[in-house]
Image (cartoon, rainbow, N blue to C red):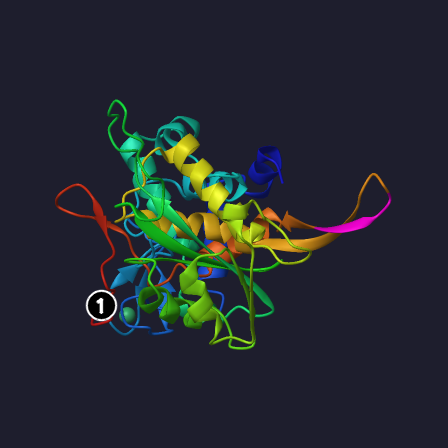
Amino acid sequence: MDIDHLRARFPDENACRTFFESIIWRNGRVCPHCDCSKSYRLSGQSSRPGLYECDKCKRQFTVTTHTPMHSTKLPLWKWLLCMYLMVNSSKGISSVFMAKWIGVAQKTAWKMGHAIRELMDPGAESQPPLHGIVELDEKYFGGKPRFKKGVTHKRGKGTEKQPVLVAVQRQGAVRSALVDSDSVAELCPWVKRFAQKEAHLMTDENQAYLQIGKHFAGHSSVNHSAKEYARGDVHNNTAESFNSILERAKQGVFHYMSSKHLPRYLNEIGFRWDHRIPTEKKTKKGTKKIVMIAMPVLELLYSLLSRALGRQIRRSKKGGIFSPITSKAC
Ligand SMILES: [Zn+2]
């Protein structure tokens, strides 16, 4: 779906609101303040479109109340366009460019980006453990140390950089987490959470995985330091491919991802990774191979908006953002 089709599908604010309501309230309209299912539309001259009042708590709400779009003054079309651009990009879009493209201030685009990344968080409940072949790898986030003549700085492991553990099911979903270190004690609980016991782990030669692998049905590793990157079907190139997207997003788009906001950037890249379908494709030689194709845009938008209710992003007093816990009390 290109932008022309998107505009034709959502020609005005009313069409956007109807689309949002059909997904966020797919099980029927509920008051976001007290969960009551009885409410009525306010249609007076002073009421803005899409405003409802709860029959029980008498508080007013719209489809964006208690979602990451809470109290937005922007047209829903701009939110939809921002979501469309984010789900269609390969490595993400910086807030500077997003601001130019959708016609808002950079700070607004930055907050919108993080609100949408909040929607991209699958949540613990919808993250069943990975199965089959599960590839593991670590990624280290942080800038290069200041240049010193004659000094060669270490890269990745063993530096002060933020380690991220990445687990990828082959032709399947990805899980990632910020970890304190790459020790067995730190990594093992995460790997146990991410992968089923019956899974076959595939890793590089990192010694920690030798210990962790004992808790799973199988473990194979390749020796990168001996320039062995694949041995038949044994490799962790899929996990490295995900890490490569993270690196390109950092180097080419965002330039800086703080540890504080890093989980949201991981959610964004993980969302696009998880919303692909394995599809058989013919190669030029006539053989068949499996390629991962992105899901249709409307399905991606549905997936985003279906997670909206109860998640919030607010500006903090210091100018940053935080996620308040939604109070259900009336
Ligand atoms: Zn209510």
Point out residue 160 in the picture as x, y percentages from the top left corner: 25, 46
Which residue type does callout 1 highlight?
Ser
For residue 187, say whether it is visible: yes
Tell which residue pokes out farthest to the top in this image: 149
> Which image quarter is the C terminus in?
bottom left
Question: Which residue is at a point 33% across and 62% down the rendered structure image?
Answer: 183
For residue 48, say whether it is visible: no
| Disc 1 CB within 8 Å of nearest ligand 1 atom | no
Question: Which residue is at a point 23% across and 64% down the rendered structure image?
Answer: 325
Q: Is residue 270 above or below residue 150?
A: below
Q: Quadrant of ligand 1?
A: bottom left
Residue situated in front as seen by the camera: 93 or 241: 241
- Main secondary structure found in the magenta portion: strand
Label 1 packing within 10 angstroms: few (<14), some (14-19), many (20+): few
Q: Is residue 246 above or below residue 235?
A: above
Residue situated in front as seen by the camera: 241 or 145: 145
Point out residue 91 in the picture as x, y percentages from the top left corner: 48, 39
> Which image quarter is the N terminus in?
top right
Question: Which residue is at a point 33% across and 48% down the rendered structure image?
Answer: 262
Q: Which residues are magenta?
A: 286-290
Q: Is residue 250 above or below residue 217?
A: above
Point out residue 133 in the picture as x, y percentages from the top left corner: 59, 65
Q: Secondary structure at mark 1?
A: loop
Say which residue label 1 marks.
Answer: 327
**Residue 213 part of the magenta-drawn span:** no
Q: Is residue 127 above or below residue 148?
A: below
Q: Is residue 221 left or right of residue 141?
A: right
Q: Is residue 186 left or right of residue 19?
A: left
Asked where in the image residue 251 lies, by quadrant, the reply is: top left
